[in-house]
Image (tube, rainbow, N blue to C red):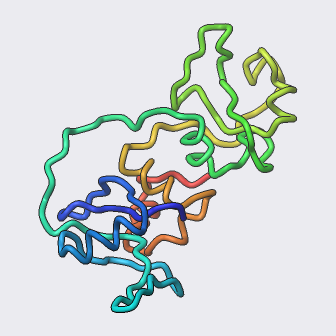
């Protein structure tokens, strides 16, 4: 896990910060520690704290409403849990379902994670033209879902606390 998830006072995901910044927020009493990384601690002469994995702000922060998560190649790979949408092997590239040369755009619904072999095999064709079938349909995650998925790393959403990923079981986050 690369960062610490920051929750609003209402338990909505806001952003990520470095574990060091999270410790500072907790020590300044601006945030409460909700979940710690098992077996990891920050130690100093007068300090011994667990490394925060999730913190919650004590005061509610009003943020502008964002309807869509911003698209990125890394976001597509994380959304698809680094699994190829065509064969299920480890994915290292992003493939456009409708190729860019045919008007396909960089959107959540037009891109999937793909292994290099399948990306080359599909080339400048649609999956139907290449005789390939998508194992999973691309979807557009909400901003909060994209943040939680990104914190889980390469498909390791199970590393996060169960209460935080309970929405995944409820269907908000789609499993690959």
* Left-right relation of 12 to 48: left
| Towards the viewer: 87 or 41 | 41
When the figure is inspected, residue 3 is found, relative to residue 72, above or below; the finding is below
Q: Residue furthest front?
A: 45
| Towards the viewer: 176 or 77 | 77
When the figure is inspected, residue 149 is found, relative to residue 51, above or below; the finding is above
Could you tell me which residue is drawn at 19 percent across and 63 percent down?
10
Q: Quadrant of residue 48?
A: bottom left
Image coords of residue 113 (percent x, y): 68, 39
When the figure is inspected, residue 8 is found, relative to residue 103, above or below; the finding is below
Could you tell me which residue is drawn at 42 percent across and 84 percent down?
50
Image coords of residue 167 (percent x, y): 39, 62
Image coords of residue 124 (percent x, y): 78, 15
Q: Residue furthest top?
A: 102
When the figure is inspected, residue 4 is found, relative to residue 61, above or below; the finding is below
Q: How many marks?
A: 0
Could you tell me which residue is drawn at 38 percent across and 78 percent down?
35
Image coords of residue 130 (percent x, y): 83, 21
| Towards the viewer: 6 or 132 | 6
| Towards the viewer: 53 or 83 | 53
* Left-right relation of 88 to 78: right
Position of the N terminus by quadrant: bottom right
Q: Quadrant of residue 100?
A: top right
Could you tell me which residue is drawn at 27 percent across and 58 percent down?
12
């Amino acid at each position: 896990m690369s960062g610490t998830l920051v929750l609003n006072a209402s338990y909505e995901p806001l952003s990520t910060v470095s574990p060091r910044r999270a410790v500072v927020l907790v020590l300044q009493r601006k945030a409460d520690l909700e979940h710690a990384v098992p077996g990891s601690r920050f130690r100093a002469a007068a300090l011994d704290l667990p490394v925060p994995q999730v913190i919650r702000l004590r005061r509610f922060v009003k943020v502008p409403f964002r309807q869509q998560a911003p698209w990125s190649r890394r976001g597509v790979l994380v959304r698809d849990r680094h699994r190829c949408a065509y064969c299920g092997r480890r994915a290292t590239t992003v493939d456009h379902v409708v190729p860019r040369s045919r008007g396909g755009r960089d959107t959540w619904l037009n891109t999937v994670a793909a292994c290099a072999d399948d990306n080359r095999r599909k080339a400048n064709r649609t999956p139907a033209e290449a005789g390939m079938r998508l194992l999973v349909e691309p979807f557009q995650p909400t901003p909060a879902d994209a943040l939680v998925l990104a914190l889980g790393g390469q498909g390791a959403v199970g590393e996060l606390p169960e209460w935080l990923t309970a929405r995944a079981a409820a269907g908000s986050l789609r499993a690959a």
